[in-house]
Image (tube, rainbow, N blue to C red):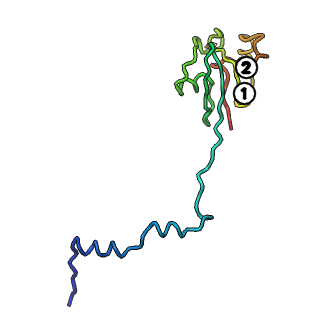
Amino acid sequence: MMISRKLTVGSLKEKAKAMPDHSVIQKTVPSQLKRKPEKRAINKIKIIQNNKNYTVISNQKKSSLLDLALEQSQMLSYKCKKGSCGKCMVEVLSGASCLEAVTKQERETLKGNLERNYRLSCQAIVNCK
Ligand code: FES
């Protein structure tokens, strides 16, 4: 003889009430097992161009300071993107350690401004690790 049980909405509600309260279960998990969200260092490069301050946040990709700034809607002025016009020149206020070494093209275009923390944003490569 086969016993069949008919499920109704009411019978399911009864079982739902019998289920343990999930909030109680969460409270019983030892604190050592809970994962804390990983804190990632945010590397910011603060620059100034034409008396306007900009903050560029580096990501893990290697790209020019200008491209990164434009991706982040920081509207820096530029023209050639080849390192010859000097229009993209910025003064680095902080975060210079995230920039790769000055290129030969930058040296030629910036001349005396290198000592004053100026860089060509189209040539300066952001490489924070
Ligand atoms: S845009 Fe011309 S030197 Fe950078």
**Secondary structure found at label 2:** loop
What residue would you read off at disc 2?
103
Quadrant location, the C terminus: top right
Quadrant of res 19: bottom left
Q: What residue type is labelled 2?
A: Thr
Q: Which residue lies furthest to the top in this view?
A: 85
At label 1, counting other C-alpha atoms closer than 10 Å, the crowd grade (few under 14, some 14-19, many 20 or more) is some
Distance Cα–Cα, label 1 vs label 2: 14 Å
Residue 128: % across, % down: 68, 35
Q: Is residue 14 above or below residue 127?
A: below
Residue 16: % across, % down: 33, 72
The label on residue 96 is 1
Residue 17: % across, % down: 34, 73
Q: In which quarter of the image is ligand 1?
A: top right
Count of labels in the image: 2
Is ligand 1 within 8 Å of the beta carbon of the residue shown at mark 2? Answer: no
